[in-house]
Amino acid sequence: MTLLTVMNPRLAHLPFVLLLLALLAVTPGPRVVAETANDCDAELNAWIDGRLGATLLLNTYLNPVGLQWSTEDCVVYLEGQVESEIEHQLVSRLVEGIAGVRNVEDGIRVTQAAVSPEAQQLISEQMAFRGWVRDATLTAQVQYKLSTNRSLNADNIEVETDDSVVVLRGEVPGISDRSMAEAVTRNTEGVEAVRNLLDVAN
């Protein structure tokens, strides 16, 4: 049984980065949705675990700190605690919406207890990491769209993202390339604003 825990962000960083990169690959997901336990193999269990990890981490309405989950025979087992019933229901719906999941065993507890300074620091670090993952994802998506646009020369364009604001730097051959780069960036899902600092070559 595979168990993923989002309790210590320092230990959780590497697995979630790998999960995110895997989800950004061209793989569309499991080819077969398991109807019975016999149809569910280790590969499908691992895919569900990875998809669930990325889904919970990147959801902007959910704080996954304190949640634990595992997958066996395509059944997801949830444990840990959340701060409200709304978060509880959100987790359940996110899990049920993942392809391949046959059933959910929900052991999540709802607690309104005061958060200790140590726990608050843990939450802050986890939220900061989620922001880093989001920004890194946007940077990769914008770079890919710019480099594959046949109407644009993007060889010397550098892309940086901070809190969903994308900054374009470098040099482009003409004004049309500068405008095109900004338009492509603005049309990328998740980008909230663009700072176009591109220079036009003389």
Image (spheres, rainbow, N blue to C red):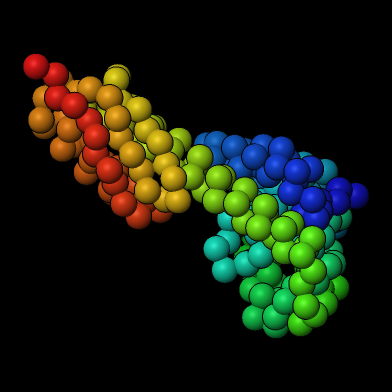
Residue situated furthest front in the rendering: 117
Quarter the C terminus occupies: top left
The part of the image, by quadrant, that contains residue 28 is: top right
Judge from the rendering whether residue 178 lies leftward or rightward of residue 43; answer left or right. left
Kindly tell me whether residue 117 is visible in this rendering: yes
The part of the image, by quadrant, that contains residue 23 is: top right
The part of the image, by quadrant, that contains residue 6 is: bottom right
Q: Of 77 and 101, which appears nearest the observer?
A: 77
Q: How many marks?
A: 0
User: What residue sits 77% from the left and 72% below the top?
Assistant: 115
Image coordinates for residue 120, horizontal then vertical, percent: 72, 64
Judge from the rendering whether residue 61 lies leftward or rightward of residue 202; answer left or right. right
Residue situated furthest top in the rendering: 202
Image coordinates for residue 127, horizontal then vertical, percent: 62, 56
Would you place residue 41 above or below residue 85 in this image? above
Kindly tell me whether residue 75 is visible in this rendering: no
User: What residue sits 66% from the left and 75% below the top?
Assistant: 87
User: What residue sits 70% from the left and 47% below the top?
Assistant: 50
User: What residue sits 59% from the left and 37% below the top?
Assistant: 21
Image coordinates for residue 109, horizontal then vertical, percent: 82, 77
Would you place residue 166 above or below residue 85 in this image? above
Judge from the rendering whether residue 60 lies leftward or rightward of residue 200; answer left or right. right
Q: Of 55 and 83, which appears nearest the observer?
A: 83
Image coordinates for residue 58, horizontal then vertical, percent: 58, 55
